[in-house]
Image (spheres, helix red, strand yellow):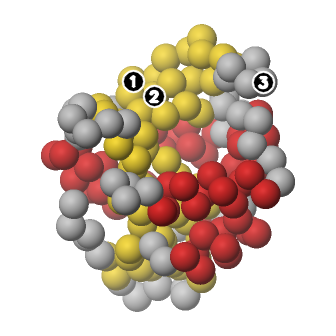
Amino acid sequence: MEYRVYKDHNLEIRKSIRSDVDYLKENLRPADIEELRLMGITGHKIGETILSGFESPESTCYTVEFEGRVVLMFGIVPVNDDKASAVLWMLSTDEVRKFKKRFFKLAIDYVEMFKKDYGVLFNLIHPSNKLSLKLVEKLNAVIEEGYKNPSTGEPFFLFLI
């Protein structure tokens, strides 16, 4: 998949680099840290989780910079080689709130681009992660309740696009 770059006066979306992972893992917004904890991902495992979305040769990973600072990473990780589905993920800092409406609009374009290559995009969201739920609602995702994390027993929503 070819990377799509976006840039305006204070917002840039570009291909991720390793230093983005290092910065983001130290500056995640509390809701993302809590959601990862409820999945059983804590401590150094947080960095490993972000890194896996970045380093997988099949994955596509973008970084959003706002006023020159890394504020968000998102991407897809294919489930298998047949391109039937991919995991869609996003993690951010608290600064995402400064431009969330603009990013939500841009996210629609990126999801449409991902959908050209993959049949279904999906992931799990904890019910307490309100910002992420708002985004998947804007993306017209089907949201299903009743999923439990096998490691923690915590309830999660499954979203499908």
Rendering coords of residue 40 (x, y %): 76, 36
Locate residue 47 relative to residue 145 in the image: left or right.
right
Marks 1 and 3, how far apart at CA: 24 Å
Is residue 153 in view from this perspective? yes
Of residues 109 and 23, the one drawn nearer to the viewer in this rendering:
23
Q: Amino acid at mark 3?
A: Thr
Residue ID at (38%, 28%)? 160
| N-terminal label among 3 and 2 | 3
Q: Residue at x 60, y 70 (%)?
A: 21
Query: Is the Cβ of the residue at disc 1 closer than 8 Å to that at disc 3?
Result: no
Rounded to the nearest angstrom, the CA distance separating label 2 from label 1 is: 5 Å
Decide: is 103 above or below 138.
below
- In the picture, which quadrant includes the N terminus? bottom left
Label at residue 126: none
Q: Residues within 10 Å of mark 1 (few under 14, many from 20)?
A: few
SS at circle 2: strand
Residue 141: name its quadrant.
top left
At which x and y percent is residue 2? 21, 67
- Mark 2 touches mark 1? (CB < 8 Å): yes
Answer few, some or many: residues within 10 Å of disc 3's Cα (few below 14, many 20 plus, some between 14 and 19): few
Name the residue at 66% across, 39% down: 129
- Tag nearer the camera, 1 or 3: 3
**Of the image marks 1 and 3, the number of the one nearer the N terminus:** 1
Q: Is residue 90 above or below residue 36?
A: below
Q: The C terminus appears in which quarter of the rendering?
A: top left
The residue beneath circle 3 is 152
What's the mark number on residue 142?
A: 1
Residue ID for mark 2: 159
